[in-house]
Image: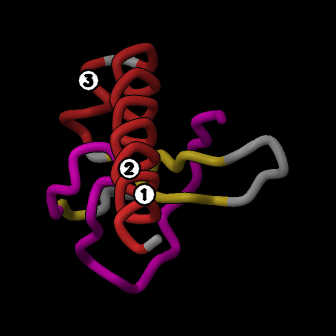
């Protein structure tokens, strides 16, 4: 994963932060989380950007591992 800075060309005024899920208004530039292929996964709000890239990655990894754990639990309940 990487952080990418782009000019804001979105016509949508408010976005949800990929990291904290809070709604925020996009500025002239936006920070986007992308994967190794360059696929965009979501915007990052100014408060999360201020916490730094290490904190952002840890937060995303924690969210992914929590989601993965819930997914495994749900799949075992369905069996």
Question: Which of the two labelled residues, at mark 1 and mark 3, occupies the earlier sequence position?
Answer: 3
Crowd tier of the residue under label 3, counting other residues whose Cα lies within 10 Å: few below 14, some 14–19, many 20 or above:
few
Q: Is residue 13 above or below residue 66?
A: below
Q: Label 3, secondary structure: give it.
A: helix
Mark 2–mark 3 CB contact (< 8 Å): no
Nearer mark to the viewer, of 2 and 3: 2
Residue 71 has which mark?
1
Q: Which residue is mark 2?
A: 67
Q: Label 1, secondary structure: give it.
A: helix
Mark 2–mark 1 CB contact (< 8 Å): yes
- 8 relative position to 1: left or right: left
Point out the image quarter for the N terminus.
Answer: top right
Residue lying furthest front in this view?
79
Q: Which residue is mark 3?
A: 50
Residue 39 among those drawn in magenta: no
Q: Is residue 62 above or below residue 63?
A: above
- 73 relative position to 37: left or right: left
Q: Residue at x 43, y 36 (%)?
A: 65
Crowd tier of the residue under label 1, counting other residues whose Cα lies within 10 Å: few below 14, some 14–19, many 20 or above:
few
State the residue in front, 10 or 49.
49
Residue lying furthest bottom in this view?
11
Q: Residue at x 25, y 39 (%)?
A: 46
């Amino acid at each position: 994963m990487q952080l990418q800075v782009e000019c804001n060309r979105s016509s949508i005024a408010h976005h949800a932060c990929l990291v904290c899920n809070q709604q925020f208004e996009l500025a002239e530039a936006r920070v986007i989380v992308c994967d190794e292929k360059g696929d965009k996964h979501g915007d990052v709000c100014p408060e999360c950007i201020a916490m730094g890239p290490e904190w952002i990655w840890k937060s995303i990894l924690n969210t992914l591992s929590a989601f993965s754990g819930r997914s495994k639990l749900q799949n075992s309940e369905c069996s």
